[in-house]
């Protein structure tokens, strides 16, 4: 059941408990004084919740930390017994949990008089909600929001009223009842529940509704699915008002959930091999309700034989050696822990008739900012599947101008193409920089990635385009029939990140990786793709894009390999001619209108033991204009020591192993995070003149914010350790001229883009 639906059922049920103390009289807002508050967004300020205007509102601002609060001085003592909350009619930014505290002096607050969840019936419920409790004599009131229904954590408060009881306070104290019950399955045995009260007095329990009975504190399920609402009551005594609380849990019929199973094995191509060899079949399976259910196993029935797949981290596999050429029926069955199964039937032709072939994957796809594929494109394609059948795989990348007004993008944009590995990890196969405003063709040998360029799997493209045109992309592959030196290979991704280059606080940010080769590996190589980005007078020596760096690879602590990260761009290495702009300037690891060539080194001498691999950036370079350089003096040593458009390297590192006996894909050795999340955020005010803020709906951890102009040139970069820090930051763009700009929020987990208009 939808989580919101469960919450709303719970909210609706507790309404009676929250209103059981009777009506109150609104205390006039004119007598209120705001004593303190947690936050507002500087536009919709806290006073708007008490201005008698039900159109204006107080906004916390997105991603502010909870709890959020407002403290109110009523001006005199009242017998306070509740409050009312009016939401905005057009927004879902509503409080979820709340607490109410009272005080005689505004300093000593004691325990909450009441806590719970607001009784919304839906996210669009716009009616005023009244919350009541036992009357307490007090002058100061603190309303606390402990959570929000909005994904961005914001709360909009149109109107707040504090209520005075129609009968005098009795001197009794309020008590809070707590009760929480996890979801259950229809076949669960009777179980006990245990609530508590702040008074320490005993509770009694009853079933309000749902497929269950209760005796004392033992609940027995009837065997039917549904939602059960349980009420805990404390009747009170001379010292305490009565109190109650309800809790809702879902009873789930687990027999209704079936596994989902997929495989890279495809019927679109035969399984090709010159001699019958073992072929790894990779599979994935999942099932809903992971708190209760799991995938027990995957089996494969091939002819009359049924075998069990091996479970790895994030996937399953089976090494199948066909017993003959010809057609084979393979039934893949995922077995859920609830006894349910799901079958996938594949008819696979095994063939030794192998010829050259061309296979198109991504075909005529437009990547246009703001379009259907706005900077990203995802698609699933099938490719040949084989063992030792092709000795070369060449990728042909065609970059054309889309049929739009601006046609090809005017600027050199970072781009890459990734493929999804069996465990869901994205592995880069092509690093590319677009040309200045023209169409071009490119090719690259991807034979090292043969183990992953097989069967049915997902591709994705990223192009860092910003609205001055776009790109049309086609990717096809030439498979050259022939016997490779090794029939099997595998890829392990060990680095995948954007690193600071020359940051005085961390000159060598790349982790050392302890890598273990497969026991049957016969050869290996290290592939590193690195391109330098960032430039300007506030980057020492125009790094990283225009800095000729010498980097090193240390093997077991010994400086073993050297990389001169510098590419001559005139003539263009990919013969991409007719470009505009500064395409002739040499650059760090790339040129406009080229596939950035990776560096490769032989690791075969090390395959009999594990190795420690470390990628060292040029040890002679430090960005003296970096904000982390304490000796930088604005206007003296550098133009602006606070400028944050600093040098950076985009690094991907892969270890490729080879063998004539099967090598299996293994989950990456590094703690890598794929860029898969789309961050959604708004900027306000927008348009703006000098300053703005960001409201981010979702993010994971630390983020980077970049401001680009319409040409895609980076103007400002900011780093935030948390969404709270980002939300509280006031961006100053007073030095930028009128126009349209782009704001990017990004980290290794994802990225998001929004437009900002500046009007002077």
Image: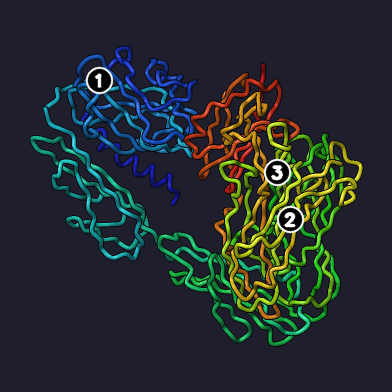
| Residue at 61% from the left image edge and 20% from the top image edge | 690
Q: CA distance from mark 1 to mark 3?
A: 56 Å
In the figure, residue 189 lies in which quadrant?
Answer: bottom left
The residue lying at 60 percent from left, 86 percent from top is 304
Residue 754 in view in this figure: no
**Nearer mark to the viewer, of 1 and 3:** 3
Badge 1 local density, few (<14 within 10 Å), some, or many (20+)?
some
Q: Nearer the viewer, mark 1 or mark 2?
A: 2
Q: Nearer the viewer, residue 653 or 748?
A: 653
Name above or below for residue 542 compared with residue 455. above
The residue indicated by pointer 1 is 25
Could you classify mark 2 by the number of other residues whose Cα lies within 10 Å: few (under 14), some (14-19), or many (20 or more)?
Answer: some
Q: Residue 294 vs residue 731: left or right?
A: left
For marks 1 and 3, the one nearer the N-term is 1
**Which of marks 3 and 2 precedes in the sequence?**
3
The correct choice, above or below, for 20 with respect to 232 in the image is above
Secondary element under disc 2, as helix, strand or loop, is: strand
Residue bearing mark 2: 563
What residue sits 42% from the left and 33% below the top?
A: 94
Residue 375's disc is 3
Q: Position of residue 384 (x, y in %)?
A: 76, 69
Secondary structure of residue under mark 3: loop
Label 2 and label 3: CA atoms lie apart by 31 Å
- Give the alpha-carbon distance from disc 1 to disc 2, as whole Å: 77 Å
Whether label 2 touches label 3, CB < 8 Å: no
Residue at 9% in and 38% down: 237
Q: Residue 546 vs residue 1: left or right? A: right
Among all residues in the image, which is located at the extreme top? Answer: 30
């Amino acid at each position: 059941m939808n989580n919101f639906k469960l919450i709303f059922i719970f909210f609706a049920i507790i309404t009676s408990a929250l209103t059981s103390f009777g009506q109150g009289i609104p205390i006039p807002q004119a007598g209120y004084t705001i004593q303190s508050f947690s936050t507002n967004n500087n536009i919709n300020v806290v006073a708007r919740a008490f201005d008698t205007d039900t159109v204006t509102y107080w906004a916390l601002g997105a991603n502010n930390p909870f709890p959020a609060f407002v403290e109110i001085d009523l001006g005199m003592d009242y017998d306070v017994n509740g409050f009312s909350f009016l939401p905005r009619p057009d927004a879902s930014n509503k409080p979820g949990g709340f607490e109410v505290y009272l005080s005689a002096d505004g300093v000593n607050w004691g325990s909450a008089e009441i806590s719970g969840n607001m009784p919304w019936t839906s996210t669009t419920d716009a009616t005023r909600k009244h919350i009541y409790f036992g009357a307490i004599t007090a002058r100061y009131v603190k309303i606390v929001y402990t959570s929000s229904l909005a994904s961005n954590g914001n709360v909009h408060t149109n109107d707040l009223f504090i209520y005075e009881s129609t009968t005098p306070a009795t001197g009794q104290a309020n008590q809070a009842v707590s009760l929480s019950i996890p979801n259950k399955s229809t076949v669960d045995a009777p179980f006990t529940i245990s609530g508590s009260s702040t008074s320490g007095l005993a509770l009694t329990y009853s079933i309000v509704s749902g497929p269950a009975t209760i005796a004392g504190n033992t609940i027995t399920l009837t065997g039917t699915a549904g939602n059960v609402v349980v009420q805990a009551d404390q009747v009170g005594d001379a010292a305490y008002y009565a109190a109650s609380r309800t809790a809702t849990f879902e009873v789930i019929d687990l027999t209704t959930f079936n596994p989902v199973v997929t495989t890279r094995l495809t019927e679109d191509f035969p399984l090709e091999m010159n001699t019958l060899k073992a072929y790894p079949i990779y599979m994935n399976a999942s099932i809903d309700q992971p708190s209760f259910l799991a995938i027990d196993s995957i089996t494969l029935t091939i002819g009359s034989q049924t075998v069990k797949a091996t479970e790895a981290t994030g996937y399953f596999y089976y090494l199948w050696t066909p017993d003959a050429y010809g057609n084979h029926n393979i039934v893949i069955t995922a077995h859920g822990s609830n006894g349910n199964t799901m079958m996938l039937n594949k008819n696979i032709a095994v063939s030794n008739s192998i010829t050259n072939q061309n296979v198109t994957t991504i075909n005529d796809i437009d990547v246009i900012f703001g379009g259907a594929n706005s900077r990203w494109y995802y698609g699933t394609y099938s490719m040949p599947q084989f063992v030792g059948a092709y000795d070369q795989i060449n990728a042909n990348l065609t970059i054309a101008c889309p049929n739009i007004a601006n046609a090809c993008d005017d600027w050199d944009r970072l781009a890459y193409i990734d493929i999804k590995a069996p465990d869901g990890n994205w592995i880069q196969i092509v690093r590319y920089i677009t040309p200045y405003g023209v169409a071009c063709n490119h090719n690259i040998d991807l034979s090292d990635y043969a183990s992953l360029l097989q069967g049915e799997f997902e591709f994705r493209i990223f192009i860092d385009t910003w609205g001055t045109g776009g790109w049309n992309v086609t990717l096809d592959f030439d498979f050259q029939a022939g016997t490779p030196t090794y029939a099997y290979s595998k890829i392990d991704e060990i680095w995948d990140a954007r690193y600071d280059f020359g940051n005085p606080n961390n000159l060598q940010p790349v982790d050392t990786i302890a890598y273990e080769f497969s026991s049957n590996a016969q050869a290996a190589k290290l592939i590193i793709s690195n391109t330098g980005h960032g430039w300007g007078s506030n980057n020492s020596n125009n790094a990283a894009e225009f800095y000729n760096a010498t980097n090193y690879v240390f093997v077991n602590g010994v400086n073993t390999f050297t990389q001169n990260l510098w590419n001559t761009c005139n003539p263009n290495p990919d013969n991409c001619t007719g470009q505009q702009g500064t395409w002739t300037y040499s650059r760090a690891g790339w040129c406009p209108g080229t596939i950035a060539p990776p560096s490769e080194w032989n690791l075969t001498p090390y395959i009999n033991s594990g190795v420690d691999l470390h990628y060292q950036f040029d040890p002679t370079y430090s960005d003296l204009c970096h904000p982390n350089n304490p000796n930088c003096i604005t206007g003296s040593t550098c133009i602006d020591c606070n400028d944050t458009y600093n040098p950076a390297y985009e690094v991907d590192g892969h270890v490729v192993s080879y063998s004539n006996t099967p090598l299996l894909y293994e989950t990456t050795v590094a703690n890598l995070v794929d860029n898969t999340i789309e961050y959604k955020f708004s900027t306000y005010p927008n348009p703006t003149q000098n300053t703005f803020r960001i409201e981010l709906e979702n993010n994971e951890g630390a983020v980077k914010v970049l401001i680009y102009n319409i040409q895609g040139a980076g103007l400002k970069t900011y780093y935030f350790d948390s969404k709270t820090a980002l939300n509280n930051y006031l961006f100053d763009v007073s030095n930028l001229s009128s126009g349209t700009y782009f704001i990017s929020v990004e980290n290794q987990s994802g990225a998001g883009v929004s437009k900002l208009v500046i009007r002077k």
